Every structure is written in C-alpha cells, then in structure tokens.
Amino acid sequence: MMCKPLIEMVIEDSLVESTTDHQRKLFSVHGDHDGPSIIFIAGLHGNEPSGVHAMQHLFRAIEPLRSSMKGSVHGLTGNIGALRSSDRYLDTDLNRIWSVERVEEIRQGKFVPQVRDESEQVELLQAIDEILTADTGPFYFMDLHTTSSATIPFVVVNDSLLNRRFTRQYPLPIILGIEEYLDGPLLSYINELGYVAFGFEAGQHDDPDATARHLAFARLSLHLCGVLDEEVFPVIEDAQFLEDASNGVANFFEIFYRYRISEGEHFEMYPGYVNFQRISLGQQLATSEGKPIYADRNARVFMPLYQSQGSEGFFAIRSIPSIFLKLSALLRNSNADRLLTWLPGVHWASASREALIVDRKVARFFAKQVFHLLGYRSRRRDRDHYIMKNREAASRDEAYADAPWMR
Ligand SMILES: [Zn+2]
C-alpha cells in the first residue's frame, strides 16, 4: 500500500449543496482493512449536479466509519466547467470522447486539448489513473447521471457477464447494450479495461428526489461491493427506496434502436413522453424538420430528448426474457463463439480473437441477436463490414472471484 492520508476531503462544508465551485477529487476515504475500490464519477454532464450533492452526503456518512471499512471509496467530479454554467458540456460532450486511441494519446503526453472539455478529460483520466495505481482493487466504477425526460431510476451497462452479474443485485431496471449506440462514453472505455463499470440514472435533472436516489444507490453499492457491513451501515431502507422509485420494474432490457440527430437537424420530441413508456406501431414520437417520426413497432421509448444539447433523439428498448439471459451466459462460458468463424464472411480481426470482422450481408442473415447472445457487440467498420467485439475477452473475472456477489 502506498503511504497516503486516510481521508482527503476537498470541499468545505459550507460548499455542500452548492454548485458554484468544484474540485476534481471530491473525496477519498480509505478504510482500515483491505478491500475493493469504488470510484463514483459525478457531474460528467454539467447539467446533472445531483450526483455531486449525493457524494457530499456520502462522504459525511462514511467518514466516521473508516475503522469498519474494507477498501476505499472515491468521489470524482466530471465536467467542472460545465457544472459551473449548468450546461451538459461546454464545447464537446465529455462523455463521448473516450476512444482507446484518445486515451493512449493522453497517457503518452501526445494529446493537446483543443477545447475546454478535453482539458477536463485529461485531468479526469489522471485522477482515475492515480487511483488505479495506488489501490489494489478489485475496482468498481459507477457513473452518476440524470436524464432530460421524467424517468424511474435505472442502470445502464455494457453487456458483459461480469457487469450483468453485479448489476442484477440492484432492485432496478438494467439496460444492456448501450455501447453499440454511443461513441466514446467513459464507462465503455473502463469496461475495455475489464473492470465492472456502469451508469446509474437517478431521475429527471430537476427531480427533487434525484439526489436522494443517487445517495441511496451509492450506499447500497458500498454494501454490495463488500465495503461496509449491514451492522454498521444498514442499507435496507436504501434498497426499498430504490425499489419503490422504480415501481418494481427490475428486468433486463436491451436497446435495439436509436434515433440519431444529424448535425444541424431540427429535432423535437413529441411532448409528454416518459422514459420506459410503452409505444405502439405507428405512434408519433417526434418531428424532424417539422415532419413526423413514427414508431415502427411495439416497444418502450427510452431516453427521449427534452433538451437542446445531445445527439440521441430517443432509443427504443424491449425486455430480455430470462431464458435468453441464461442461454447467453451458457454459450459465452462455453466459448461457443469459436463456431462463428465457420460462417462465410466471418473472420477474426486479429490473432488475439477478441473481435470479429463480419460481412454486413452475413450479419443481416444471422440476426445481430445471435452475435449478442455470444457476447459480441457490433460497430460499423466500413461500408460492407461490421467489427464485432467480444465483451467477455477483457473481463477481469479472477479479480472479482472473492467478491460477495460472486459467492
Ligand atoms: Zn448524463
């Protein structure tokens, strides 16, 4: 263990609940016993301050419990400049610029930030890397957000078995597969490193309950990771609070459609949609350049956009039957994906067998679901091909082998 202060709290009490000043590192609390590291990221979008407020409350709750604590808990601030002006971002979305290439450039000192949000990225990566170096892990990354539309709280997660297994402990809906639709979110990058990492959306930006939900989620997370035991840190009420807030919806859902807003396009969501609302074929959802956009099947609407900044108009989701979840775990654990390369138009992208290059015609014929089932998520590579990455390949399963949720 490195020698370091047991507690670092940057924010003064007088600033609690204020969004006028922010520090990259909100707090780090190191317990007296070895254990996991939880890293909360709050305010990655500047118009979503409730996670920052919740972290201030969390710090005050756990600081006196250090002697009972296993591992460490860290609170990091996302986009400080955007939090100051209450904007989602200043020049570019801080949660869409975490490509592997970009992160490598930053780490090698070759990256020169062009805009303010990119400077924030450099600082935030440094803060994350410091924790990854100083602590022993296993590591859990949790990204705290709110949405522009009214919503029950929910978890968004890249679809790896490790992520599924951890997140199914929450009494909340779990949305799988966001990584196929978003470019460069921070947590997809963290997942590439093999850690458990996911996002928690607490409600609408101005929902008075958002901070309380972020706090309940964080408290419950500490318990689920094994940082604090029930006797010293009871979380039954927190779990109940989240369960009530999500109206008992605790299924796994998958995203199967995204409406992407083009540069300069005038998009307007039809008023009144709430997250998870059921939609039926032919229902008007939005307008683009004044022309209506209709649902092309029955589904649920997800993340309808009710703010001016943002490039995803809405998503459509459907629940995943539990038999399908079990089947995919079975297939992934038995490396059934090796058989995929027997198909014409499917071959490994490299010798490490972590990604497949798939002819788009083949992907159309063997529905993407087959690839999903086997743990692959697709990105368009060029006009004729997808690159499909295996989400299981990077997972650091052995690092979590002793975690309470693995038993
Ligand atoms: Zn957000």
Image: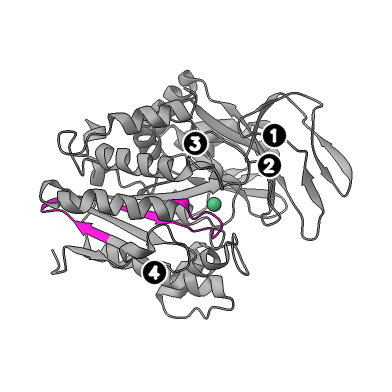
Residue 398, by quadrant, is top left
The earlier-in-sequence mark between 3 and 2 is 3
Could you tell me the amino acid type at mark 1? Tyr
The earlier-in-sequence mark between 2 and 1 is 1
**Residue at position x 71%, y 23% from top?**
298
Residue where numbered disc 2 is placed: 314
Q: Along the horizontal axis of the image, is 185 left or right of 61? A: right
* Quadrant where the image shows the C terminus: top left
Q: Residues within 10 Å of mark 4 (few under 14, many from 20)?
A: some
Q: Label 2 to label 1, Cα distance in Å?
A: 10 Å
Q: Nearer the viewer, mark 3 or mark 2?
A: 3
Label at residue 153: 3
**Residue at position x 15%, y 34% from top?**
231
Q: Along the horizontal axis of the image, is 131 left or right of 378? A: left
Q: Label 1 to label 4, Cα distance in Å?
A: 35 Å
**Residue at position x 25%, y 43% from top?**
400
* Residue 10 position within the rendered picture, expressed as x and y whole percent measured from the top left: 30, 68
Contact, CB < 8 Å: mark 2 with mark 4? no
Label at residue 273: 1
Residue where numbered disc 4 is placed: 23
